[in-house]
Image (cartoon, rainbow, N blue to C red):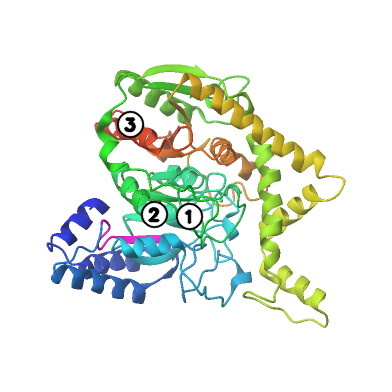
């Protein structure tokens, strides 16, 4: 049952939130041993939230637009008094003293926080294989990764453990796992969803976004969690975008551009699999058939996004992660001096990928290298913004694959960091520009695994990209993605 139908049934008193919770807990009990979507199932919190939703309905009060809907939350989102680990040993034993804004807003909307989902440590990765607690598995084929870093959230929705989930997307971490698990994933415009209480990875890129099994469900979740928050200085001072009202507008007359560099052709990004290219083209043809005016648009600097990202994101991470020093949070390994204690704690607490990023970022920011690396990456970021601005003078939205391939096997890419980084080549440009993008499931690949198509738009174009995605959702539902 969709989140919207569930909430409607609970608000009308036809279903009890406690029953719905129990159904989902039973599914988790049956299958999460194998999937490992969750680091923690928050049954106690969920039950008390469900009971108050049922009590509100019994008293004739409306619990809100997500009444009784279980939501799985990525474990880098602070939950008061409930472990928030970022799938890292360094946060062992830490209990956040406050709730993230998204947690508060979910609660006020009647949602039920059902658990904290697994991720690549500190959201660094594309497969959940960097989790200190072991990887999550793809519910479509448990020999494959679910993608990452929000792999647990994507797997939870794909496995039916929760109709909705929250992830964070710094370079693709909502959209790529959504694509690999066959669900909808959204990276909103930077500043639409408050980052208050999201553990920082790369603050100028991080953005919280929804997972759902339908566009309408993703829309209601974004409406609930979006909108201005004075506790995040980068929050856009406007209400959340209104999405549910516009989903059915259609694409007649809309200008749709296919990003040349991400279309699998010569001169573009290499390594985009032919089956992924074929599905993307099929999606574009479907939009054309629905009345859109389609053209190819070059975004030349898109190809440089990956290199710029792997300087900017580690640079910001090296600064953000300096707070984990064994003094203020989590794990401490004692040693004779403070400096040695810091080193011992961080050596024991951080995994290899996090260490690699801290070293890369520290190097890129160090005297003598700052201009050559970090400064240059910032210039590339500006070029990407200019190229997108030029493209959006000609088209309303852009289309590309979400991920270059379907889900891959465990261990396939762990030996070579570059092979893993390339996963985000199509998603990173939107993080660098701050623009919104959505991944929508559109058929399967040669291996039978889900493929996602990405719709990108300019800042605050969520209503438009959701409209386009709805058209593709209808086409796929009618068998047009086979
Ligand atoms: N896979 C990318 C990385 O490892 C993106 C991660 C993310 O969006 N959090 O940095």
Q: What is the x, y in percent for residue 80?
A: 46, 73
Chain part drawn in magenta: 65-73
The answer to whether the beta carbon of the residue marked 3 is less than 8 Å from any atom of ligand 1 is no
Is residue 438 shown left or right of residue 92? left
In the picture provided, is 303 more to the left or to the right than 104?
Answer: right
Residue depicted at x 22% and y 57%: 7
Q: Nearer the viewer, residue 82 or 21?
A: 82
Residue 22's image quarter? Answer: bottom left
Quarter of the image where one finds residue 60: bottom left
Q: Are marks 1 and 2 in contact (CB under 8 Å)?
A: yes
Q: At which x and y percent is residue 420?
A: 61, 45
Circle 2 sits on which residue? 225
Label 3 and label 1: CA atoms lie apart by 29 Å
- Asked if residue 36 shows in the view, the reply is no
Q: Is residue 361 magenta?
A: no
* x and y, in percent, of residue 67 in the image: 25, 61
Kind of element beneath mark 2: helix
Q: Residue at x 17, y 60 (%)?
A: 11
Residue 397 on image: x %, y %: 44, 27
The mark that comes first in sequence, 1 or 2, is 1
What residue lies at 76% left-to-right and 40% top-to-bottom?
Answer: 375
Disc number at residue 194? Answer: 1
Label 1 within 8 A of ligand 1 by Cβ: no
| 83 lies above or below 262 | below
In the figure, is residue 84 to the left or right of 310?
left
Comparing marks 3 and 2, which lies closer to the viewer?
2
Above or below — where is 185 with respect to 352? Answer: above
Q: Quadrant of the C terminus?
A: top left
Which class describes the residues within 10 Å of circle 3: few (<14), some (14-19), or many (20+)?
many
Q: Which callout, 3 or 1, points at the residue further toward the start of the chain?
A: 1
The residue singled out by tag 3 in the image is: 472
Residue 264, relative to residue 211: is it above or below? above
């Amino acid at each position: 049952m969709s989140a919207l139908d569930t909430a409607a049934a609970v608000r009308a008193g036809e279903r009890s939130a406690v029953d719905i919770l129990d159904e989902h807990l039973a599914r988790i009990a049956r299958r999460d041993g194998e999937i490992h979507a969750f680091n923690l199932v928050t049954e106690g919190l969920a039950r008390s939230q469900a009971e108050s939703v049922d009590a509100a309905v019994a008293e004739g009060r409306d619990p809100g637009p997500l009444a009784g809907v279980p939501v799985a939350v990525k474990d880098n989102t602070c939950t008061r008094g409930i472990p928030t680990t970022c799938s890292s040993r360094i946060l062992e034993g830490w209990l956040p003293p406050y709730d993230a804004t998204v947690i508060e807003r979910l609660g006020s909307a009647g949602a039920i926080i059902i658990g904290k989902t697994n991720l690549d440590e500190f959201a660094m990765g594309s497969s959940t294989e960097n989790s200190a607690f072991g990887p999550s598995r793809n519910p479509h084929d448990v020999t494959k990764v679910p993608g990452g870093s929000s792999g647990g959230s994507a797997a939870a929705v794909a496995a039916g453990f929760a109709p909705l989930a929250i992830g964070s997307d710094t370079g693709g971490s909502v959209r790529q796992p959504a694509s690999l698990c066959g669900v909808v994933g959204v990276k909103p415009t930077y500043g639409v969803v408050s980052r208050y209480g999201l553990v920082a990875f790369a603050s100028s890129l991080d953005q919280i976004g929804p997972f759902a099994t339908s566009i309408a469900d993703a829309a209601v979740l974004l409406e609930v969690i979006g909108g201005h928050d004075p506790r995040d200085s980068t929050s856009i001072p406007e209400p959340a975008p209104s999405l549910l009202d516009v989903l059915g507008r259609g694409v007649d007359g809309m200008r749709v551009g296919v990003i040349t560099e991400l279309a699998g052709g010569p001169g573009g990004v290499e390594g985009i699999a032919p089956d992924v290219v074929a599905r993307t083209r099929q999606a574009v043809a479907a939009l054309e058939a629905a009345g859109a005016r389609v053209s190819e648009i070059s975004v030349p600097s898109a190809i440089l996004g990956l290199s710029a990202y792997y300087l900017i994101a580690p640079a910001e991470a090296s600064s953000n992660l300096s707070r984990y020093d064994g003094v203020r949070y989590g794990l401490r390994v004692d040693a004779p001096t403070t400096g040695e204690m810091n080193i011992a704690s961080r050596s024991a607490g951080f995994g290899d990928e996090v260490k690699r990023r801290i070293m890369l970022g520290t190097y890129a920011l160090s005297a003598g290298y700052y201009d050559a690396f970090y400064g240059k990456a910032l210039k590339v970021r500006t070029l990407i913004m200019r190229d997108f601005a030029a493209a959006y003078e000609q088209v309303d939205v852009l289309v590309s694959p979400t991920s270059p391939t379907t889900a891959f096997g465990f261990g396939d890419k762990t030996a070579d960091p570059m092979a893993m980084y390339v996963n985000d080549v199509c998603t990173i440009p939107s993080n660098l520009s701050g623009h919104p993008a959505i991944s929508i499931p559109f058929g399967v690949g040669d291996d039978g695994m889900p493929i996602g198509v990405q719709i990108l738009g300019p800042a605050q174009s969520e209503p438009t990209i959701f409209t386009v995605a709805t058209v593709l959702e209808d086409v796929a539902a009618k068998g047009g993605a086979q």
